[in-house]
Amino acid sequence: MASSSSAPAPAEPLRRNRILSSKLYLDVPASKAPVVYSSAYNIAFVGLEKLHPFDSTKWGRICKFLTKEGYLEKRRVVDPLEASKEDLLVVHSEAYLKTLKSSFRVASIVEVPPVALAPNWLVQRKLLHPFRKQVGGSILSAKLALERGWAINVGGGFHHCSAEEGGGFCVYADISLCIQFAFVRLNISRVLIIDLDAHQGNGHEKDFANDERVYTLDMYNAGIYPFDHIAKRYIDQKVELVSGTKTDEYLEQLDKALEVSKSRFQPQLIVYNAGTDILDGDPLGRLKISPEGVVIRDEKVFSFAKDQNIPMLMLTSGGYMKSSARVIADSIINLSNKNLIQLDNQLG
């Protein structure tokens, strides 16, 4: 929760040491694009993943569209490391991580009850490993954004998870982790979260409740999960939508919100949570935004960052229809065509 009047509190020594000793901040050669993805992101769990509306192969399908259509070479994609327990302890408590050794607890968080019956070693390998890999990708994306001006983690955006509590298919708090790493490793002290997933980002809101270095702009459908009224108090700028909001109204609200944010807070890094569950027909988001509207939304946010010369990283977050992957790929292609990002290799 941002305020211009107070200085940031210093990082606790233990947290700082964990961040400084982490291996997640890879040195990425200039021949690679600041696009982070691993085939390990995708979830295949003996069919159980199909019991949740989330498309658990979305991340791989986005990259396939981009590579097949000639916008991104496979060899130019950055493969992140998996976040280790020590990395996760930068935000999460030992007690919370211990609860994930219960398959029943994980089943509750990911909202797939039969996961409770699976042995935990299988849950760790088939479900939590892909999530930890995506967390590593989100953390690395901040470094790439500072180095290149922008970065996209084709995954992450687990905005319902806080330090002490998972939920809504979000097991690890990658947004909070990414920002805590950036404070220490990138020597920055002002971060703007633009959360445009259809759901309220209650996880990071609770984690940064009293942290004046973080300003949160959250535009969400107020009539759906998570109804977290405590976390709402910590949103610096909230735009509450109603179910059925259409494209023109949505984009008009976004324009106004970005202008207000610009006048209130000058960040050194933007974390953009770009959920596609705002799409018309999404069973959970319940908004009526067209695929073209999503493309325009992303273009507006990237233009907002580029016009002010602010580094930005994008996370793909929620989206519960098979069409989401195609829309995200089309949006990334549009950003490239508009020269808001550069996917081609200038080094030849």
Image (cartoon, helix red, strand yellow):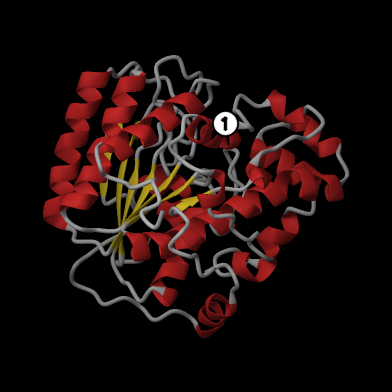
Q: Position of residue 61 (x, y in %)?
A: 57, 31
In the depicted structure, whether residue 140 falls above or below residue 50: below
* Residue that label 1 marks: 61
Residue 208 visible here: no
Q: In the picture, residue 243 is in which quadrant?
A: top left
Location of residue 257 (image quadrant): top left
Q: Mark 1: which secondary structure?
A: helix
Quarter holding residue 173: bottom right
Q: Relative to residue 156, is residue 137 depicted above or below?
A: below
Q: Is residue 251 above or below residue 181?
A: above
Q: Is residue 238 above or below residue 69?
A: below
Q: Along the line of sight, which residue is nearer the eye, 53 or 96?
A: 53
Task: Classify 10 Å Cα crowding around label 1: few (below 14), some (14-19), many (20 and above).
Answer: many
**Does residue 73 appear left or right of residue 193 in this picture?**
right
Task: Please state which of residues 51 and 145 is positioned toward the viewer in this rendering.
Answer: 145
| Residue 339, image x, y percentages | 25, 43
- Residue name at image x 50 percent, y 61 percent: 140
User: What residue do we see at 51% from left, 85% from top?
Assistant: 13
Q: Indicate the position of residue 272 as horizontal and vertical percent values.
A: 36, 47
Count numbered badges in the picture.
1
Q: Is residue 294 visible?
A: yes
Q: Residue at x 34, y 60 (%)?
A: 148
Q: Which residue is outermost to the bottom?
A: 13
Residue type highlighted by circle 1: Arg
Quarter the N terminus occupies: bottom left
Q: Give 85 or 292, whichever is nearer the viewer.
A: 292
